[in-house]
Amino acid sequence: MKKVFLVLSLIGNFAFGQEIKIESDFPGGNIIISKITQDTAYIKPDLSLNEREWFHWYFKTLNISGKRVTFKFEQNNVFTKYGPAYSINNDRTWKWYGESRITNNSFTYSFNEEDTIAYFSVSIPYTEKNFNEFLSNVKNPDLIEKSTLCLTDEGRKVEKILISPSGDEPKQRVVITARHHACESSASFVLEGIIESVLNEKNLEYLRENVEFLILPFMDKDGVENGEQGKYRAPRDHNRDYDSVSLYQTTATIRNQIPEWGDGKIVMTLDIHSPWVLGGDNETIYMVGVEYSQFEKEQMKFSHLLEKNAWEDLKYYHKNFMPFGVSWNTNKNYSQGLSFMEWGLTLNGVLMSTTLEIPFANVSGATFSADGGRGFGKTVAYSIKEYLQSISAKNEFD
Ligand SMILES: [Zn+2]
């Protein structure tokens, strides 16, 4: 009897190959597996550190050669308008699977015989590995000083980037942050574009000669590497950690160090985010208005500059500016604690502190890509230059 069973199971293995495998034990990975059958995986995002539902997931799948597999999510709202992002046989060539591929929170993929591994994610992933690769290829790296801001609660290094004028003391300083919410990967491609432009654009000499940039690419480094949602992390997330005693080492350190470093010269802070996964405002690039009208006025100027300078694939429309008091942007939203943007307004000399939201997939009808994100970073860099120049010109007549 045993022998018969053995023979049958050998035939079974031969006929169907090994069972498909799903894994998330790599930087940025996130998935909960409920069940895997011959051709269907029942899965959902891991929300275990969250107080509310969110949508980040990212996994790799193996033993897929020649198979047709359905990935069935046991949660709503886990796909962008263009479906999942995916990369076959490596984790580098990300594409969107497509608008019409999702039915009942699931998609099906037919793998070729030569496919051995595939990566799928709600968004185009971005972790420390991507940032290091960017830095090692960037032109004019000599202008960059990379150091460690602090160690995270889990002992990881938090990158700190300084781009300083080579000669004199800087006239103005700018602070740029990203990934206060770990899963917001599209923001990181825009940040790459900003850095690249500041270093290399011929017409951005003003920035290289007068402005010092402090850039913190991973505000929730542990969350980014662990593949956590970050947004709505319990009991409060990194972007609500700017009053009373900070819970996280990174936020505590910048509250402690940035005011002194700034020495009254920080004129602008910019915090780059990504919104919710789908629909409405979440599919446009937009700025988030602050509560105080004198600061909002400065945001408006910058918003008009973004619209004017958006000559690459991804557009910005001033009409999408979200004033304080509208949609989610109300006092209730900040009841857990101050955001970086609000904290930025308290810095001595600051004229503008703003949040910029970069969609994951659909950007006013254009499709988000790594290059598209970088292109919009160029738009941001030119707008920073024009905004800072307008301030310094005004100061000369004060
Ligand atoms: Zn965010």
Image: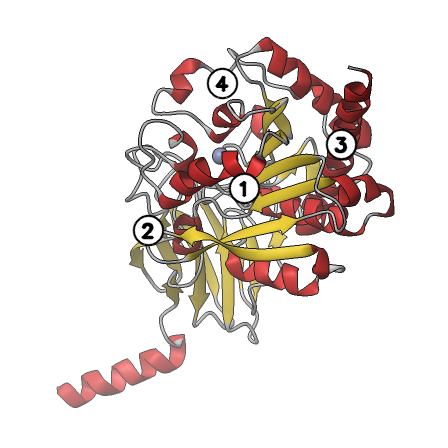
Quadrant in the rendering for residue 210: top right
Q: CA distance from mark 1 to mark 3?
A: 18 Å
Q: Amino acid at mark 4?
A: Asn
The residue beneath circle 4 is 329
Label at residue 383: 3
Quadrant in the rendering for residue 17: bottom left
Question: Looking at the image, is mark 4 or mark 2 nearer the viewer?
Answer: 2
Whether the residues at callouts 4 and 2 have beta carbons within 8 Å, the answer is no
SS of the residue under disc 4: loop
Q: CA distance from mark 4 to mark 1?
A: 19 Å
Whether the residues at callouts 4 and 1 have beta carbons within 8 Å, the answer is no
**Lower position in the chain sequence, tag 1 or tag 3:** 1
Q: Amino acid at mark 2?
A: Asp
Within 8 Å: ligand 1 and the Cβ of disc 3?
no
Label at residue 345: none
Q: CA distance from mark 1 to mark 2?
A: 18 Å
Q: Residues within 10 Å of mark 3 (few under 14, many from 20)?
A: many
Q: Residues within 10 Å of mark 1 (few under 14, many from 20)?
A: many
Question: Looking at the image, is mark 4 or mark 1 nearer the viewer?
Answer: 1
Label at residue 153: 2
Question: Does residue 277 appear in the picture of this structure?
Answer: no
Q: Nearer the viewer, residue 289 or 164?
A: 164
The answer to whether 367 is drawn above or below residue 109 in the figure is above
The residue beneath circle 1 is 178
SS of the residue under disc 3: helix
**Lower position in the chain sequence, tag 1 or tag 2:** 2
Which image quadrant: the N terminus?
bottom left
